[in-house]
Image (tube, helix red, strand yellow):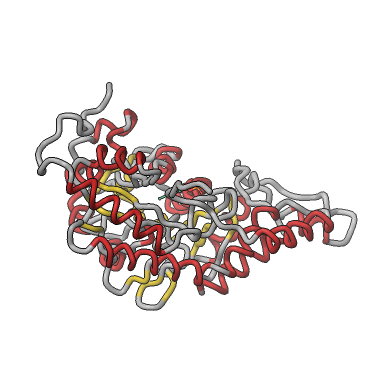
Amino acid sequence: MSNDIQLFIPTYRVDECLAEIKQCLEHGWTGAGYKTIELEQAWTKYTGLPNAHFVASATAGLHLAVRLLKEQDNWANGDEIISTALTFVSSNHAILYENLNVVFADVDQYLCMDPKSIEERITPKTRAVLFVGLGGNAGQLQEVVRLCKKHNLKLILDAAHMAGTRINGRHVGHEADVTVFSFHAVKNLPTADGGMICFNDDEMDKEVRKWSWLGINKDTFSRTVSQGAYKWHYDVEVEGFKYHGNSIMASLGLVALKYLDRDNSYRRQLCSWYDELLGDMFERVPVARGCESSRHLYQILIDNRDEVMLALNEHQIYPGVHYRVNTAYNMYAHMVDTVPKATIASDRIISLPLHMQMTRLDVERICQTLKKIVQSMPAKKVVASAPKMQPVL
Ligand SMILES: *Cc1c(COP(=O)(O)O)cnc(C)c1O
């Protein structure tokens, strides 16, 4: 048996997944409709959110969120959305797809956007805030909600890590105009690829169903089951996208959703073992008060991060980094000096392995190894080989 401890391994309940997929194949329906509708209904029931539309990915969902809000409120090209640099690039690409400008706000101790920094970045061109709940953490989301109301800004919640995250007992998503979840294989509700876009406004939900299927105003499934000679008759109202999800992916999602709370509570168990065994030797990213996090990530902050990661690899332990500050990438490099805290964090964060196949023994091995590595390293100093934050031009 391999001694490797990987960062993320998706867990699929294979027999249950195959049973769902078998139904699709026997039914002769693998596309949008059928299982996608079942999953949408199961998701609204689980979260209490008024609407949910299953899409091909969270990236597609984020693009639709920006596009539809832009349409609704007549935003102009060059208008601004305040976002974070400490995220997967798709959060920010979604803004650029619509010819809007990304403005980065800096992060707080939760590595989420700091409301104070957001407020400083608001200009007459600001239209929305895109908040990322990093690792499942809600950070100061409630404060950001108040800020958006005060300044009449739309709030887009990138909840790619937040399936099952609750704030004061209620699932996240109610507080934003639109919330987008990811059901990618490495996320905590794994399909192979998929996402859920949840508008709180019913009309926007109707719109997004049209936009996710090329602007066609009725989905194929309801045309197939509808009676009459004109079922091929549909209108195309807008230049929409091919972004909807399919029934095979939804089948995997239906099974994963059944186990989501159980899985997240095991994730929290793994995290509390990390807390216990790492002791006070390590600086960790705290979970915000009142937030029951999905615990997609367990992050610590450490000096000499790159060396520590390499040393862990030598012990077959493979942690990750979430994320490199986006200003380290060429296309966002012009904003390199705007987010000092995110930049420092980006050099110091490690996401320790966290998945459903880990045991307490794995956590023990990781913590012991990590402690040994850190103790054997020279005392904290500026290390010449630390990653440079200068853009590569
Ligand atoms: C994974 C991720 C996305 C994109 O999700 P996909 O479903 O892979 O498109 C967006 N934002 C964040 C923060 C993510 O981690």
Q: For the point 54% across and 73% down, which residue is it?
A: 46
Residue 31: image location, x then y, percent: 72, 51
Rendering coords of residue 264 (x, y %): 46, 67
Residue plotted at (18% across, 62% down) = 280
Q: Residue at x 34, y 62 (%)?
A: 137
Is 185 or 200 nearer to us in this picture? 185
Vertical order, 353 against 165 (above or below): above
85 left or right, relative to 210:
left
The quarter in which the C terminus is drawn is top left
Image location (x, y in percent) of residue 204: 53, 60
Q: Quadrant of residue 100?
A: top left
Q: Is residue 289 above or below residue 26?
A: below
Residue under the point 67% across and 66% down:
38
42 on left or right of 356: right
In this view, the residue in front, 183 or 5, is 5
| Residue 52 picture location, percent across and down | 56, 63
